[in-house]
Image: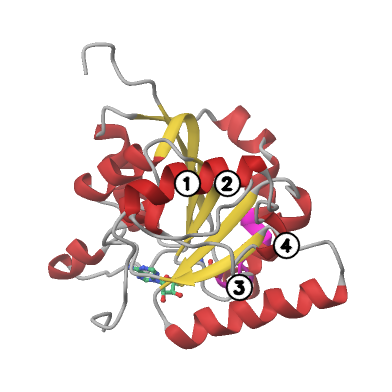
Amino acid sequence: SDHQLTYPASPEHMDWSSHYPAFVLENSQEQIDAESEANVQTGLAVKRLKQDIEVADIGCGFGGLLVALAPIMPDTLLLGMEIRTQVTEYVQERIKALRAQHPGQYENAACLRANTMKFLPNFFKKHQLSKIFLCFPDPHFKARKHKARIVSTTLNSEYAFVVRPGGIIYTITDVEDLHNWMAQHFNAHPSFERVGEEEQEADECVKVMRVETEEGKKVERNQGQKFVALFRRLEDPPWR
Ligand code: SAM
């Protein structure tokens, strides 16, 4: 259950400084300006980062994708979001250990406990993200459980809000029915189009996503199939 989870009232209320200490703005005029502007609005004293998070791994599990992507995208802030407390703590410890072993690296990755089915726009501003990963989401096989799937018409509108035009939603699953469900829901959504196979296969992140998540490794061991689909966030029509 997630009733003890807390959420920032808005993205401006979120203090990311403990998650990305290497990216906290120095005590410069730039910081004072950024802090005073945002903090006047929220009435809070929040340490601001030099840049925004751009990549979210939703339901990140044990963090395999996060720690594989971090060194590949060293200048981009990556966030894993996971609902299970112990799993979140495991990923946080994993990142802490990697930072200690490799000074200067993995500073751009962090993991936060959250129920991403609720309040995603409380964490991210409109069009903040360039990529969202939905890797091996829980399939919720039974029809009466489909409402628990993390792809739905409603949630896709939240993804459309937080992802910028041109941004990509990455999906992978070993459950063909869920793959079809995700494709159907994203295809039906006016803010998304499916990315063609050639572009998909040329994407470095797809290669990483296929092999680096813990669930993906399990599927590999069991010689299961992996279904991949990418969806591009389209420009909003001018009349909106
Ligand atoms: N993405 C990881 C991988 O590929 O190894 C984990 C896949 S696992 C099958 C699904 C994960 O999503 C679990 O760790 C689960 O706790 C998490 N999860 C399920 N619902 C969630 C929600 N609403 N918010 C955040 N995480 C969620």
Q: Position of residue 72 (x, y in %)?
A: 77, 50
Report, in whole angstroms, how far the alpha carbon at label 4 lies from the one at label 1: 25 Å
Residue named by callout 2: 32
Label 3: state its secondary structure: helix
Q: Position of residue 25 (x, y in %)?
A: 66, 51
Ligand 1 - quadrant of the structure image? bottom left
206 and 236: which one is in front?
A: 236
Mark 2 surroundings within 10 Å by alpha-carbon count, few (fewer than 14), some (14 through 19), many (20 or more): some
Q: Are marks 3 and 2 in contact (CB under 8 Å)?
A: no
**Callout count:** 4
The structure residue drawn at horizontal position 34% and vertical position 38%, both measured from the top left corner, is: 160
Numbered circle sitting on residue 214: 3
Three-letter amino acid code at the position of disc 4: Glu
Q: Are marks 2 and 1 in contact (CB under 8 Å)?
A: yes
Compared with 53, 5 (above or below) is below
Quadrant assignment, res 237:
top left
Is 212 included in the stretch rendered in magenta?
yes
**Closer to the N terminus: mark 4 or mark 1?**
1
Report, in whole angstroms, how far the alpha carbon at label 1 lies from the one at label 3: 42 Å
